[in-house]
Amino acid sequence: MASAPFDFAPLLPAGLPAPAARWTGLAKYSFIGGNNDPDQLPLEGLIDAVNAVLTREGRTLATYGLASGPQGYRPLREFIAAKLKRDASIACAADDILVVSGSLQALDLVNQSLLARGDTVIMEQETYQGSLNRLTRLGVNVVGIPLDQDGMRMDVLASALADLKSRGITPKYIYTIPTVQNPTGTILPEARRAELLRLSQAYGVPVFEDDCYADLIWDGQRPPAIYAMSETSNVIHIGSFSKSIAPALRVGYIVAPWAMLSRMLALKTDAGSGALEQMVLAEYCAAHFASHVPKLTRGLRAKLDTLMEALNEQFGTSAEFDDPKGGIFLWVKLPDNVDTLKLYQAALAAGVAINPGPEWSTNKGYAVSRLRLCFASPSHDQIREGIALLAEVCRKEFGVPARSANVEKHASTSV
């Protein structure tokens, strides 16, 4: 007689997130997540880098931290420091950088260092789901600041800070994705960055700058990082190689004053992020990063054009969007009667995966008819076919769009 399986449920502590579902594979037409273009992955260069770096110094794998210390592989930190100086005007040394296991670990380390249940943080109203979900789980109060075509609105930020101060609340940080914002694709102009720093200083609230998409700008031109503009060392800066090289490598970094970096380093008790990934990135990027990224962005821009053309053809004026200034996402507004949480379920059943807007916003009502589409991973043909199918699903569920590819349709059209 078979024994009953052990019941772990009574042992689980309160407050755990809901259990994860088993992974059943990617949808046929996947517009979700931050996956990149597989055809633009520099596979041959990475293979050469693996062989070269392991042949030269592979035996350092026998030592935790590759004999570079707990902050990460020194050649990689030196590359990051030079890259940040060139691209973001950040003057920092390798010892000002902590290599982490992707930007998600960076978020966790910053939050563990600064936040307790009941604290308040400020962030853009539309923002990275990973950041928002973490704050929700921590029991942190979030104040969302709306965006316009130039990113976070400083007038609303000023009002929010003044209101919080009048209630005796000092936010722990202002989180922003200023350079190719996720999901809107905006870039915060230099004047607004200066105003953000002024407000930060006036109210005693540090800035948490997430620059994970900053390499993917169509024209390659960007304002200085907020970290670079600060005169009081009140900014924590994070970045990643997930979007510029490969998300599965899970390598990111934190740049911060030692007073904060030392606190985060004390919390990073994983014995070091993946050593082989760090070695390969340092080897590859030193020789090829500057030439790889422009090629990557040209390919991504072409896919964005295909996506916008497909949306215009299939949805017409029912789909509203601004041309993002870079990145891998398009933030789309559908008519008010479309609930993208419901559309997500129906579309997924038909083989199309999308990110519903409320998951990426502090204002669920505002975002209910919005969605985020990642255009990096699918091919051009998959983009066209997937958007056509999405339009069919949306029409069946919500009667939107009424016309597709210049052909009038009916809400009863089958999928």
Image (cartoon, rainbow, N blue to C red):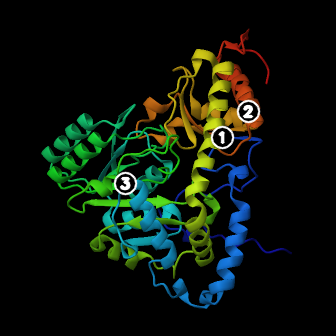
Mark 2, secondary structure of its residue: helix
Relative depth, front residue between 380 and 266: 380
Q: Residue 326's x, y, as percent?
A: 52, 41
- The amino acid type of the residue labelled 2 equals Gly
Mark 1, secondary structure of its residue: loop
Q: Is residue 328 left or right of residue 268?
A: right
Give the Cα distance between marks 1 and 2: 9 Å
Q: Residue 348's x, y, as percent?
A: 71, 38
Q: Where, quadrant-wise, is the N terminus in this rendering?
A: bottom right
Residue located beneath label 1 in the image: 31
Q: Residue 151's x, y, as percent?
A: 37, 37
Query: Which mark is on residue 386?
Result: 2
The residue shown at (44%, 30%) is 365
Q: Is residue 272 visible?
A: yes
Residue located beneath label 3 in the image: 209
Q: Earlier in the sequence, mark 1 or mark 2?
A: 1
Q: Is residue 180 left or right of residue 348?
A: left
Q: Is residue 102 left or right of residue 81?
A: right
- The amino acid type of the residue labelled 3 equals Glu
Q: Earlier in the sequence, mark 1 or mark 3?
A: 1
Mark 3, secondary structure of its residue: strand
- The amino acid type of the residue labelled 1 equals Phe
Q: Earlier in the sequence, mark 2 or mark 3?
A: 3
Labels 1 and 2 touching (C-beta < 8 A): yes
